[in-house]
Image (spheres, helix red, strand yellow):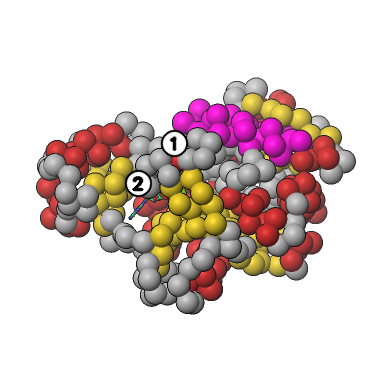
Amino acid sequence: MKVAVVQGGPSSEAQVSRASAAAVHGALREAGHAPTLIELDTGLPAALTGHDVVFPLVHGALGEDGCLQGLCELLGLPYVGSGVLASALAMDKVAAKVAFRGAGLPVAREHVVRRGDPDAAPAVRAALGTSVAVKPGAAGSAIGVRLVRASDPSEALDEAIRAALEFDDVVLCEELVVGREVTCGVADAPTLFGGLRALPPTEIRARRADFYDFSSKYAPGGSEHVCPAELPDGCAERVQLLAVAAHRALGCRDLSRVDFVVGDTPDQIVLLEVNTLPGMTSTSLYPEAMSRLGVSFSAMCDALARAAAARGGPRRRVPIPELPS
Ligand SMILES: Nc1ncnc2c1ncn2[C@@H]1O[C@H](COP(=O)(O)OP(=O)(O)O)[C@@H](O)[C@H]1O
Ligand SMILES: [Mg+2]
């Protein structure tokens, strides 16, 4: 198949995206396809013509947030991954939490700050106390995220909010949850597993920073992955159940990777977010968990491209009633 592997884009994660795209490009060739690497820019609509399937590997703005997905719908091209709404919901951390709560999933208490809000920091402190996670409403890769602790000077919260506002007009402040950093892939892969299932959860141990920030994610040796995670009794099963429930709550498709903070018991698990286009280098978390189930990187990329092609162009033909005269 002619697979358009779309990379880059205007987000702060463009370089991360190119690394994923290069890896998927190689894997698809290995599986016998004819992939092309295409940059996400204004030439994209023309560049996509003639391809059989689109494989979006753009993390963040325009590629993971429903825009590229909308373009594929418009062009009638099948594409890998979640559709417009699920992509947009997952990218918007505030909107996603509305859906998670609606599905009864455990999320952290929050207070949302918008650009221009007067006295934002005191309002956050009044709502959440002095230990707060501060994140841009729509970003990723922990870019713009700061964890403020009770022991930090009081300006730390103001600074964290200001830093997050550089990335977005909306800032999600959450109570700081203590526990292990765990992520869990979800695969809806009929040809590999016969349907929807959670992959083995991975614990991420950051070495460089005190949390899984941008440098610990991407620097060599910046973090250690333990997959399958060694968690307290019952926690791994609960994480897997919640990961599938979060994927469904947003209406995701094909694949997602769901981030958690896991405490000491199954009822101390907090859902952070769903990533609809997780990192896809051969050493990334999602492919690593897949390999624990015996699925190679190349087999996984092949299955994703084939599943999208089998689903076909986006819109089903619907009956169009005649207008009454
Ligand atoms: N409420 C929270 N309590 C503790 N740590 C958090 C909290 N929210 C985020 N973090 C930390 O920040 C990281 C990034 O947050 P996340 O919500 O996953 O956003 P993204 O990965 O899109 O930047 C998490 O992996 C975790 O280490
Ligand atoms: Mg995350």
Is 117 drawn above or below residue 193 in the view shown?
Answer: above
Helix or strand or loop: what does disc 1 sit on? helix
Is 185 contained in the magenta span? no
Residue 109: tell me if it is visible: yes
- Quadrant for residue 293, please give it: bottom right
Circle 2 Cα neighbour tier, 10 Å, few/some/many (<14 / 14–19 / ≥20): few
- Quadrant for residue 251, please give it: bottom right
Is 24 contained in the magenta span? yes
Percent position of residue 181, x then y: 43, 56
Asked if residue 255 lies left or right of residue 216, the reply is right
Residue for point 61% across, 31% down: 18
Mark 2 CB lies closer than 8 A to ligand 1: no
Closest to the observer: 14 or 113? 14
Asked if residue 121 lies left or right of residue 271, the reply is left
Residue for point 66% across, 66% down: 196
Percent position of residue 195, x then y: 71, 67
Q: Residue placed farthest to the right in the image?
A: 32
Closest to the observer: 185 or 274? 185
Residue 136: tell me if it is visible: no
Q: Amino acid at mark 1?
A: Ser
Magenta extent: 1-26
Determine which residue is flagged by label 1: 215
Mark 1 CB lies closer than 8 A to ligand 1: no
Mark 1 and mark 2: Cα distance apart in space: 11 Å
Percent position of residue 71, x then y: 63, 37
Q: Residue placed farthest to the top in the image?
A: 43
Closest to the observer: 48 or 150? 150
Is 103 drawn above or below residue 301 in the view shown?
Answer: below
Determine which residue is flagged by label 2: 210
Q: Amino acid at mark 2?
A: Asp
Q: Quadrant of the N terminus?
A: top right
